Image: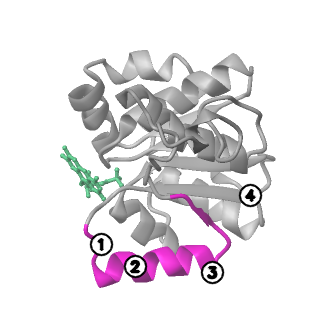
Amino acid sequence: MAVTGASGVSYAYNFLKELRKRKVEVFLVISEAGKRIIELELGIPPEDFSKLATRTFDNSDLTASIASGSFPIDGMVIVPCSMTTLAAIAHGYSDNLIRRAANCTLKENRLLILVPRETPLSLANLENLLKAKLSGAVILPAMPGFYHKPKSLEEIVNFIVGKILDVLKLEHNLYQRWGTNKIDNQD
Ligand SMILES: Cc1cc2nc3c(=O)[nH]c(=O)nc-3n(C[C@H](O)[C@H](O)[C@H](O)COP(=O)(O)O)c2cc1C
């Protein structure tokens, strides 16, 4: 799992907490910009965030196990994914551990989920999203739905976390699925 310097680190925090509840082994890398945004948006030191992961690697550590395709992983999630990291992945540019691990994930045909956050999107952003998709990544934009009638910020955040868990085929109850409850009523 990687956290890059886009707004929306709450998605990453709640996702990491969900993985921890399920005792999923998580190798975490946070970019320098990501660390700054954890401080700004969550108001906690990045070290406290990292404590939830099984292991943490420095983004400059290109000798880490996850920098090689020979190291087995089930998949990688980049949440949130900045447009800079997206551009690097789309173009196979692997100058840090997050980008290298993402490219290894793609070349080994493993699951790579990108949760991009930017608005509006430039032509370059859109082309890079398409390139990443064509390379095999799952593009899961941080675009929460509202049909479950969220009553708090937490419920909005957890909609996206639930969507990531859906792709990973991990069961959850983080948002109410359409057609399964009272939200279908016009109340
Ligand atoms: C407060 C703040 C919010 C930012 N939000 C975004 C964002 O939502 N999306 C984005 O693509 N970049 C955003 N950026 C810019 C990235 O942090 C910057 O492009 C950085 O180089 C990304 O590097 P990284 O991908 O290695 O983390 C933001 C920067 C700051 C300081």
The answer as to whether callout 1 falls within 8 Å of ligand 1 is no
Q: Which residue in the structure is indicated by mark 3? A: 134
| Foreground pick, 51 / 183 | 183
Q: Amino acid at mark 2?
A: Leu
The reply to whether discs 4 and 2 touch (Cβ–Cβ < 8 Å) is no
Q: Is residue 170 magenta?
A: no
Nearest to N terminus: mark 3 or mark 2 = 2
**Start-end of magenta stretch:** 120-140
Q: Amino acid at mark 3?
A: Leu
- Identify the element where label 4 is drawn: loop
Nearest to N terminus: mark 1 or mark 3 = 1
Label 2 Cα crowd, 10 Å radius (few <14 / some 14-19 / many 20+): few
Give the quarter of the image for residue 133.
bottom right
Q: Quadrant of the N terminus?
A: top right
Q: Amino acid at mark 1?
A: Leu
What residue lies at 50% left-to-right and 64% top-to-bottom?
94
Q: Which residue in the structure is indicated by mark 4? A: 69
Label 4 Cα crowd, 10 Å radius (few <14 / some 14-19 / many 20+): some
Nearest to N terminus: mark 2 or mark 1 = 1
Nearest to N terminus: mark 4 or mark 2 = 4
The reply to whether discs 4 and 1 touch (Cβ–Cβ < 8 Å) is no
- State how far apart marks 4 and 1 are (Cα): 31 Å
Of the numbered discs in the image, which one, if any, rests on residue 121? 1
The reply to whether discs 2 and 1 touch (Cβ–Cβ < 8 Å) is yes
- Identify the element where label 1 is drawn: loop
Left or right of 123: which side holds 74?
A: right
Give the quarter of the image for residue 170.
top right
Residue 13 x, y percent position in the rendering: 46, 28
Q: Which residue in the structure is indicated by mark 2? A: 126
The reply to whether discs 1 and 3 touch (Cβ–Cβ < 8 Å) is no
